[in-house]
Amino acid sequence: MNANDTIPPEITRDIYGMPMFVTLTVADLDRSVDWYVNGLDFISLFTIPGPHGPVLVHLRRWRYQDILIRQGEAPTGGDWTVSVMATIDQLDEIAARARAHGGGVVEGPFDTPWNTRDLKVTDPDGYTLVYTARRPEGTRDEKFSAMIQEQAREQLGR
């Protein structure tokens, strides 16, 4: 296991150009912010006020793990999942915190066939977030790892 698998980066409050982020439209802004901040492990970076209350809240977990939440009619249909990197040591704590908080659905942590340990959480509006951590050495399927490495070499022509 290398250091990147076990040491979570610190949450930064820096303002930077985000290379990618997700915007969620939610039925109840306060409820959703509460779920991500108090039920999970995000922070509220800032809120954009409007004439009748906040219109957008910027949440962050690690650098480049940003979620913007805005009030509105949540879309229906479609099925999508956003995954964020985590460390293996964080998963049980996040799962316990989310279960104790209530208001969403928590599945796992569980091992996947692709050598990660995942925690799947679904917020009150039905949005799914997966915390995914690399499984430690000795718990990985080495045949799967070798197969993926071989396929990557073939695709890269090496």
Image (cartoon, rainbow, N blue to C red):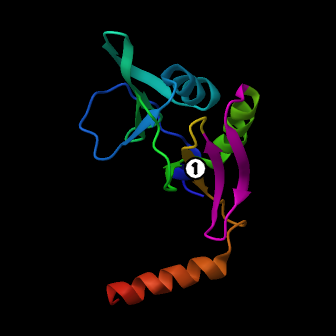
Quadrant into which the C terminus falls: bottom left
Residue drawn 52% across the image and 80% down it = 148
Above-or-below relation of 58 to 130? above
Residue drawn 70% across the image and 43% down it = 106
Above-or-below relation of 13 to 67? above
Which residue occupies the extreme left position in the image? 17
**Mark 1 highlights which residue?**
130
How far across and how far down the image is residue 46, in percent? 37, 19
Residue drawn 54% across the image and 28% down it = 32
- 49 lies left or right of 126: left
Above-or-below relation of 107 to 144? above
Above-or-below relation of 94 to 158? above
Amino acid, disc 1: Val
Residue 116 among magenta residues: yes
Foreground residue, 98 or 24? 24
How far across and how far down the image is residue 109, in percent? 72, 50
The quarter of the displayed image where residue 144 is located: bottom right
Badge 1 element: strand
Residue drawn 56% across the image and 37% down it = 125
What secondary structure predominates along the stretch shown in magenta? Answer: strand
Total number of numbered discs in the rendering: 1
How far across and how far down the image is residue 94, in percent? 67, 37
Question: From which residue to which does the magenta span run?
Answer: 101-122
- Alpha-carbon neighbours of circle 1 within 10 Å: few (<14), some, or many (≥20)? many
Quadrant into which the N terminus falls: bottom right
Foreground residue, 54 or 92? 54
Residue 103 among magenta residues: yes
Foreground residue, 102 or 134? 102
- 31 lies left or right of 109: left
How far across and how far down the image is residue 36, in percent? 55, 30
The quarter of the displayed image where residue 111 is located: bottom right
